[in-house]
Amino acid sequence: MKQEKKINVLSLFDGMSCGQIALKKLGVQVGDYYASEIDKYAIKVAKENFPNIVHLGDVTKIHATYLKIDLLIGGSPCQGFSKAGNNLNFEDPRSKLFFEFVRILNECKPKYFLLENVKMKKESEDIITQYLGVKPIEINSSLVSGQSRKRLYWTNIPNITTPEDKGIVIRDILEDEGIADMVVNQGKHLYKADIKKSHCLMARDYKGFGNQSMTGVRRVGTAVNINGHDILKRVYAVEGKSPTLNTCTGGNREPKIPVTEKLWRKLTPLECERLQTVPDNYTGSVSNSQRYKMLGNGWTVDVIAHIFKSMKKEIDDE
C-alpha cells in the first residue's frame, strides 16, 4: 500500500489556524506545522485544537532558512489595503508585514504558497502580484457559506477554479431553526423590502462597520432601539447572506437577524463559526468577544480547502 506523503507547513499570521482545519478536512497528512502568531487567545484556541503546532512567535523574528517547508500560507494584516480602512496601502505598518511573507518565501523556498488578502486598489494588488509572480484569483465566500466575503488569493497551486455555489443562506447556519421559521411565518412583510445581500465579517468590527460593499446582502429592517451609526442598526434576512464578519467584540456590532417584525437578535459565536465554515465550538474555550474577533480575522475554511484540492491531487499522484 502506498504511504501517504506528509507535508511540512509554515503558516504566517496563523490566527486560530484555519489553514490547518482546511488541510485536515481534505485529509492532507501534515508532518511539522509551524505557526507565527502573537494573539494569545488565537494561540490558545489553535493549540487546543491542534496540540502539535509549533508556535514561532513574531513573524519579524523568524528566520526560515533552516526550515524544510512544503507549503507556506498566510493572510497578512489587511487594514492598510481595506476600502473600509484608511487606504494607507504599504504605508500602513501592519500591511508592510506583507514583505515579511515575501522574505520568508524567499528563505524557505516552499513548493507551494498561498497568500490571502482583501480586495484593494489595483496599484496595491499589482505590487503584490509583482513580488509573488502570480496573479490573484478572487473568490467570494458566499459561494460556499452563508457570508458574503470577497477576498483575493495569490497562489502557485495550479488549476484553481471558482467554487460552485452551494446556495447557503443565513437560515442554514442558525442554531435554532424555529427562530427562522417564526420570522418567515410571522414577518413575511419584512421581505418585501428592497432585497440585497449583507457585507462580509471582518476583524475590526469591534470598532464598528465601515463603508463596505453591500452587494448581495438582504437587509430587511432597522433595529431602532440601538444608538450609533445606521450601519450598526441593520437587520438582515435569514434568506440572504450575512455581512462580512469583522472583529466584532461588542457594542452591537455583530450581524443581526429578525426574530419577529419588531424583535431582532445578534448572530451567536457558533453561528459565526458556521459562516466561516469552522467546526462548531472550535473557538469555544475563550470569551465571546475574542471568538467574534478571531472569526472575523480568520479564513473561510471551505474556500481554503477548495484551493488546496489541486495541491492534494498533485501530492497524491507523486
Image (tube, rainbow, N blue to C red):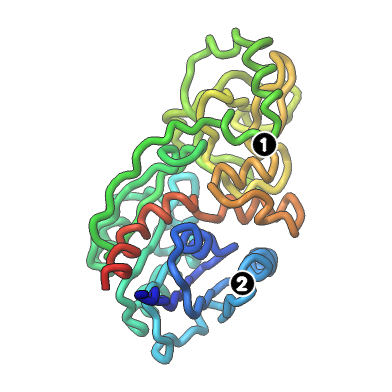
| Residue at 42%, 68% in the rendered image | 73
| Residue at 60%, 51% in the rendered image | 279
Q: Is residue 212 left or right of residue 225?
A: left
* Amino acid type, mark 2: Ile
| Residue at 26%, 58% in the rendered image | 126
Residue furthest toward the bottom? 66
Horizontal and vertical percent position of residue 216: 43, 28
Horizontal and vertical percent position of residue 10: 46, 75
Q: Quadrant of the N terminus?
A: bottom left
Disc 2 crowd, CA 10 A, few/some/many (<14, 14-19, 20+): some
Q: Is residue 52 left or right of residue 152?
A: right
Q: Earlier in the sequence, mark 1 or mark 2?
A: 2
Residue 138 vs residue 81, the one in the foreground: 138
Q: Is residue 299 above or below residue 20?
A: above
Residue furthest toward the front? 1
Q: Which mark is residue 138?
A: none
| Residue at 37%, 50% in the rendered image | 120
Report the residue marked by disc 2.
38
- The mark tally for this picture is 2
As helix, strand or loop, the secondary structure at mark 2 comes to loop
Residue 305 vs residue 260, the one in the foreground: 305
- Distance in Å between CA atoms under marks 1 and 2: 27 Å
Report the residue marked by disc 1.
267
Horizontal and vertical percent position of residue 179: 70, 24
Disc 1 crowd, CA 10 A, few/some/many (<14, 14-19, 20+): some
Q: Quadrant of the C terminus?
A: bottom left
* Amino acid type, mark 1: Leu
Q: Is residue 29 above or below residue 286?
A: below
Q: Is residue 108 left or right of residue 219?
A: left
